[in-house]
Amino acid sequence: MEIKIQTTSKDSIINPLVVSENTINRIKEVSSIAKKDIDNFLNMKEYKYIGFNFDFKPYTF
């Protein structure tokens, strides 16, 4: 049995403020690793459908 579900989603990222050398900046501006991770997340392809393929067996008593 294959089931296809369509849903909408919203990308939420966290780009917190950090204190660096007595200045307040976004972490993406201070850390190249954080910038890369956040950019990779934002550029991730979202699929319109998600498919599940499983063998459904209801409980029997």
Image (cartoon, rainbow, N blue to C red):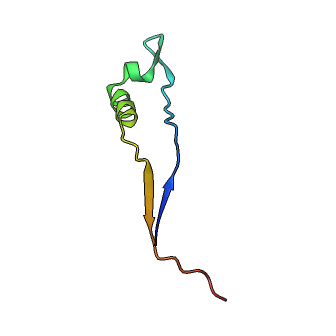
Query: Residue drawn 44% across and 52% down?
Result: 49
Position of residue 42 relative to residue 30, above or below, is below
**Coordinates of residue 17 in the picture (x, y in percent):** 51, 20
Left or right side of 36 for 27: right
Q: How many marks?
A: 0
Query: Residue drawn 51% across and 25% down?
Result: 16
Q: Nearer the viewer, residue 20 or 1?
A: 1
Position of residue 25 relative to residue 44, above or below, is above
- Which quarter of the rendered picture does the C terminus lie within? bottom right
Question: Furthest residue to the top?
Answer: 23
Query: Residue drawn 40% across and 33% down?
Result: 42
Position of residue 43 relative to residue 31, above or below, is below
Question: Furthest residue to the bottom?
Answer: 61
Q: Nearer the viewer, residue 39 or 6?
A: 6
Asked where in the image residue 50 lies, by quadrant, the reply is bottom left
Query: Residue drawn 39% across and 31% down?
Result: 38
Question: Furthest residue to the right?
Answer: 61
Asked where in the image residue 54 lies, by quadrant, the reply is bottom left
**Coordinates of residue 52 in the picture (x, y in percent):** 45, 64
Left or right side of 61 for 33: left
Position of residue 13 relative to residue 56, above or below, is above
**Coordinates of residue 45 in the picture (x, y in percent):** 36, 41
